[in-house]
Image (tube, coloured by chain):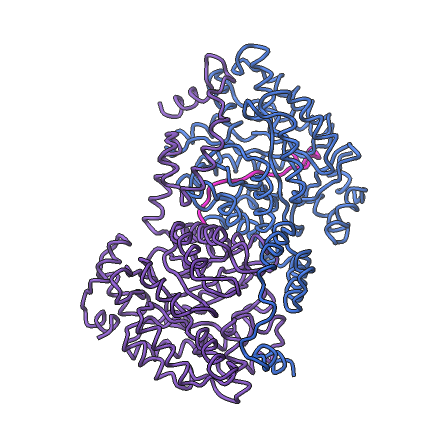
Chain colours: A blue, B purple
Amino acid sequence: MTILEKARAGELTAEMIYVAQKEGIDPEIIRAGVASGEIVILKSWRQNINPVAVGKGLFTKVSASVGMYENDDTIDSEMAKIAMAIKAKTDTLMDLSVRGPIDQMRETVLKTVDRPVGTLPLYQTLAYAQEKYGTALDMTPDDMFEMMEKHAAEGVSFLALHCGTTMDVINRAKEEGRIDPLVSYGGSHLIGWMVHNHCENPFFSQYDRVLEICKKYDVVLSFADGMRPGCIADSLDGAQVHELVILGGLVKKARAAGVQVMVKGPGHVPLDQIQTTVQLQKQLCGGAPYFVFGCLPTDSGAGMDHVTGAIGGAIASYYGADFLCYVTPAEHIGMPNAEDVYTGVMASRIAAHAGDVGKGHPAAIAWDHEMSVARRELNWKKQMQLAIDTETATKVWKDRSTNFSSECSMCGDFCAMKIVGKYLRD
Amino acid sequence: MTILEKARAGELTAEMIYVAQKEGIDPEIIRAGVASGEIVILKSWRQNINPVAVGKGLFTKVSASVGMYENDDTIDSEMAKIAMAIKAKTDTLMDLSVRGPIDQMRETVLKTVDRPVGTLPLYQTLAYAQEKYGTALDMTPDDMFEMMEKHAAEGVSFLALHCGTTMDVINRAKEEGRIDPLVSYGGSHLIGWMVHNHCENPFFSQYDRVLEICKKYDVVLSFADGMRPGCIADSLDGAQVHELVILGGLVKKARAAGVQVMVKGPGHVPLDQIQTTVQLQKQLCGGAPYFVFGCLPTDSGAGMDHVTGAIGGAIASYYGADFLCYVTPAEHIGMPNAEDVYTGVMASRIAAHAGDVGKGHPAAIAWDHEMSVARRELNWKKQMQLAIDTETATKVWKDRSTNFSSECSMCGDFCAMKIVGKYLRD
C-alpha cells in the first residue's frame, strides 16, 4: 500500500508521526490530510532523508533548486549551493541538472542530504536523447518513462512532470497571443518535441503509466505547469487556466490510484490576482498542495527578485499556497551563485513565515510573540536566535554594536524612557 | 494663500503642473486631489528642491530616513547615506538627527538635495533642551514650537509631529497591556515629558499654534504615530486606533485651516490586518495620504527586514497606502550604513511598484509590459534599463554572462525552442 492508501485505511505510519512531531500537531491531523489529499508527505526509502509534509494547516515550506546548467557547473559547484541552501534551512531541494554527469550529481545529492529531493526527469531525458540519437527531438516516450522510473527508484521524493500540457492547451496558448508564450524550460522542450513529432504529450496520453511508476515507488507526483505565465500581462489567461482544469482532473485520477499529488503554480501574478490564482487551484484541484514559484507581483524586479518573490510568496501563502519555490537575486538574469541561493532561501522563508502568521498558524504567531518579548527585554542574544536569518542578523549586530552609544544621556539624571516604562507598568 | 487654498479656489500652481507632468497625468487631477486633501504636494521655497506629490491615484512614493544618531555619526557619514538613497531613487528624505551639529546637518541637506526633506523637530528640541536646561525633561512648549517654526522657515517640506498622542491615548495604552508599549522614539520622549510634567501634549493642546506655523510656511503636516505598534501582537489595539481617531479629527481642522496633512502609520501589522489598517486610516482621516513604516508582517525578520518591509509595503500600497517609509536590513538591530540605505530604498521601490501594478496604475503596468517584451526579445540592454534596480541587475548580468553557454545544443540541428516559437506564431 502507498502512504495515501494507508492513510485512507486509518493507518498512522512512521512518516506521519515524524512530520506531526516536527509540525507540533497531532499525527491524526496529518493522516486525515494525507487521506483527503490536502497534505502530501515527501519521503524516500533512503534513511538519510527525513520526510517533510506539505499542505493545509502546516508550516509553509520552501524549496531551493540547483543543478548543472551552465558549461562551468560541476557537482562541486552545485553541492556548494546545496550547502548554502541547507544552511539557510530550506525544507526541500530540487536537482534540475540538464547537462554534465547528471546521474552522479543526483546520486551525490541523494546520498548526502537529510531532506527530500525533487527532480524533473525530462531534463535528463533530453540530455540522454541528445547523446543517443544526436537530437533530443528523437526522444521516445519509452525514454521518458524509463528516466522517470530511474529517478523514482533512486529515492527522489517528488517528480515534476508536465502532465497537463496537452496539444489542446498549446493551441489555446497560440490563440491567446501571449507576450511571453512559454517560460517553462522543460515545458518548452516538451512542446517542441510534441509539435515536431505531431504527437500528444506522453505524460498525458499515457498517464496510467505515470501513475503506475509513482505508485510502485510511492513517490509524490508534482505537476509542472508548462503554461506558467512569464509576465504579469499573461497571468490567468486561457492557456494557464485550461492547463489547471486538466490538472484538476488528473489530481482525481492520481488520488484514485493511491498516488500523492501536488500542483506547481506561477510565476508572474499581479497582487490583485494572487488570491484568485490560489483559490482557483484549490477549487479545481480538490485542495491539493500548491507549490508556487514566487509569486512575482512585478516583472521589473531583476537583480532584486528575491524581494519580488517574497512579496508574492507571502501573499500566496496567506491565501493558502503551501510550498514556495525560492526566487534568487539572479532570477531572469543568470544562474544563482551560492550566495544568491542563501539569500533566495532566506527571503522565501521570511515570506513563508509572514504568510503563516497572517493565516493564524499558532506556532508562527508564538514565534513572533517570543521575539517581541525578547525585544522589549532588550535580550539581544535571544533576538539573534529568534531571527529567521540568525546569521545575517548577528553579523549586522556585531558590526553595529561597536558603534552603539553606551547610554542615552538625553534627559540627564532622569530618563524619559524609564518614566514612561514606570508609568505604563504601574 | 496656501497651496491647499489655491487648489480649492481652482488655481493651478506651478507645483501642480510640475508634479502632474512627473506623474503623467492631467494637472487638474492633482488640483482636485489637493483640494480634497487626498493628495499632498511636498515642496519647499528652496529652488533646488523639486516638489513631489503623494496620494490617491499617484505612484506610491518611498522615503529614506537618515540622521546623526550614534556618537560616531557625522554630517559626512549621513550625506554619504543620502547619496546612496538618491542613487537608489528615493522620492523623499527625512533628516532625523538627534545629536551633533543638527542645524548644520539640516542646512547641508536642504542646500544639497533636489527632493523634499522631512524632519521631526522634537528630536532637535530634546537635544536643545538638554543643552540649555541640563535635561530634556525641562523642555517647554515654547521650545517645541520655536524649533518647529525654525525647521519650517528653513524650507523643510514636511514636519512629523505627534499631535494625536494625548494623555487619554497614553492611558489607553496603559490599559491595553501591550507587549512593546512604545516603539516611537520621539513619541516615547514626548510621553516621558508629559508624564513627568503632568502636562497634556502641547502639539494637541495648542494645535492652533501648530496649524498657524504650518500655514505661515505652507508646510505639510505629517502626523507621527506615538502609538505605532511595535509587534504583530499589539497591532490594531485600542491605543493605536484611539490615536488614529483623534488624528482623524485633527485632519479636518488642518484642512479647514488650509494646511496640507498626511498621516503616518505602522509598523508591525500581520498580513490579515493590512487591508483593515489602511481602510481604517482612509475612513477616519478623510482619505488623507497614508505614510506607512513598512508595514512589517512578521516580527522575526531581523537582518532581512527590508524583505519583511517590502512584503508589507506592497500589500499596504495595493490597499491604498500612498507613501512607504523604507525599512533597511539593519532595522531592529542598529543604524543602517550606506549600503543598507541603498538596499532599503530598492526593496521599498519594488514594493511600491508591485503595489501600483496591483492597483492598476496604467504607467506601472506599461512599465512591466515593456520589460516583458524586452525579455521575450532577449534585449538584455533594455532589460537592464527597465529593471527597478538597474545597477544590481547589471552587476549580476555582467558577473554571470561570462559563464553563459554560447548556445543551447540540446536538439542538434533542430531547435525545440525555434519549433515552438514558429508554431505559436504561425
Is residue B325 among what the camera can see? yes
For the magenta stretch, what is the residue range? A253-272
Q: Please tell me in which quadrant of the rendered image residue A250 appears.
A: top right
Q: Position of residue A133 (x, y in %)?
A: 56, 10
**Would you say B271 lies left or right of B47 here?**
right
Question: Is residue B275 placed above or below B417 in the rendered structure?
Answer: below
Image quarter (top left, top right, bottom left or bottom right) of the C terminus of chain A? bottom right
Q: Nearer the viewer, residue B376 or A78?
A: A78
* Front one among B374 and B395: B395
> Residue A11 appears at what percent x and percent y?
81, 43
Which residue is at the front of the view, B425 or B318?
B318
Rendered location of residue B154, percent (x, y)? 31, 71
Q: Quadrant of residue A34?
A: top right
> As drawn, is B380 to the left or to the right of A424?
left
The one nearer the camera, B52 or A193, is B52
Residue B251 position (above or below residue B335): below
Image vertical order of residue A123 relative to residue A317, above or below: above
Q: Is residue A67 magenta?
A: no
How many numbered marks have been drawn onto this rendered protein structure?
Answer: 0
- B137 to B402, vertically: above or below: below
Q: x, y percentage for residue B125?
A: 44, 77
Rendered-image quadrant of the N terminus of chain A: top right
Can see residue B359?
no
| Residue at the extreme top | A133
Residue found farthest to the bottom? B198
